[in-house]
Image (cartoon, rainbow, N blue to C red):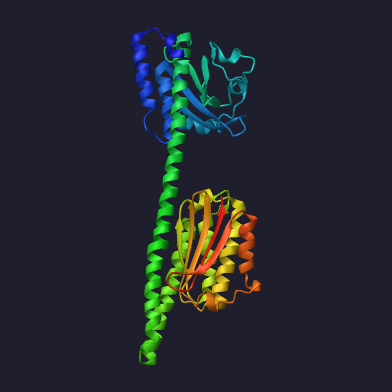
Amino acid sequence: MPYRKVDDPARLQALLGAILLIESDLDRDLLLQRITEVAVEQVGARYGALGVLGATGEGLERFLHVGVDEATVERIGHLPEGLGVLGHLITAPESIRLDRLSEHPSSVGFPDGHPAMTSFLGTPIRVRGIVYGNLYLTDKVNGSPFSEEDVAVVETLAVAAGIAISNARLRDRVSQLNVAEERERIARDLHDTVIQRLYGIGLTLQGMIPIIEGDRTRARLQISLDEIDATIRQIRTSIFELEPVTAGVRGLRSQVLELTGETSRILGFEPEVRFVGPLDTMVDEHLVPDILAVLRESLSNVARHANATHVGVELSIAEGHVAVIMIDNGVGLSRSKLAPGNGLRNLNERAARLGGSCLIETAPAGGTKMMWRVPL
């Protein structure tokens, strides 16, 4: 490790403190600024900067600096883009120490308004072995050139900076994951609790209409039912917005909710939908069209033949399989039309093609139960 080249115990202690300072829990922008400030302090430089490489590894995407005031920055007009000696460090990512910056073969001078800089020390910052950016230090305050020990100090800081940046990236990912999980939880609660309760209230009010006397009262009750339906649609819209989107593809749960919402028009009521397991992450994309087709065909069969007032739909993952279970409270198998043209044949064929099964039987409380199951 470079710190082994630092002989001065006091300086080594200061370097350790600086590393601990860098490792503080900061967001990415503050972390990069702190790394630059610490590097300047540790080698006694007048000016310092940290350049972050672009996605292609050519040129600088960001440039943070210490020691140059804002008025001077405005006079210069634009920040460095990775030319000259800075560009040399990008193409040859190894520490470089110069007593006179202008004498390096890659030197291109400074733009108008730029402060004069003589000595130079630069070193790359690597994150998991890949160059992330570079530290640049110029002109020691005491006027002396940078020493080999200064190089060791800056290289040690660069190693610590790489670890800190990697940790910051990890924190960002964890934070994003936590946000995504919370959004999924809220969406699930909205669907499993709020919407289902509204369904129950709506069904209760709907059942009261025939027994209520007075057209005006029935009309007011119908208005309330319409408002409940509108509220459910608004909540469903919120659920879709909360659904995580990966690479522009909507999740399976979101598509299922949209499909069941559409079929409510032909059913005359909203199906009750339940999800079990990490469907959006575990179900492969090639299965999604078949699952949606199975749901569409099954709900169409219920609408045409079952004379049902309630349908429960469950999608679940267990034992390496994804299952679609649908139970209605309709007339049951004995009076259902099970002719090949009604879509039931398609359910069996889809399951067989995917190495799964389809079982249709009388539900325990009457009506029909369909369980379509295929391996993941």
Compared to residue 124, the image places residue 239 above or below, namely: below
Q: Give me the residue at 50% from left, 58% from top.
A: 253
Please tell me which residue lies in front, 218 or 313.
313
Please tell me which residue lies in front, 356 or 233.
356
Compared to residue 233, the image places residue 17 above or below, namely: above
Which of the 4 image quarters holds residue 4? top left
**Residue 133: % across, % down:** 53, 27
Q: Can you name the residue that lies furthest to the bottom here?
A: 214
Q: Can you name the residue that lies furthest to the top here?
A: 7
- How many numbered circles does the render carry? 0
Which of the 4 image quarters holds residue 226? bottom left
**Residue 289: % across, % down:** 61, 58
Q: Taking the image as drawn, is residue 266 in sight?
A: no
Please tell me which residue lies in front, 33 or 214.
214
Q: Taking the image as drawn, is residue 204 in sight?
A: yes
**Residue 341: % across, % down:** 66, 73
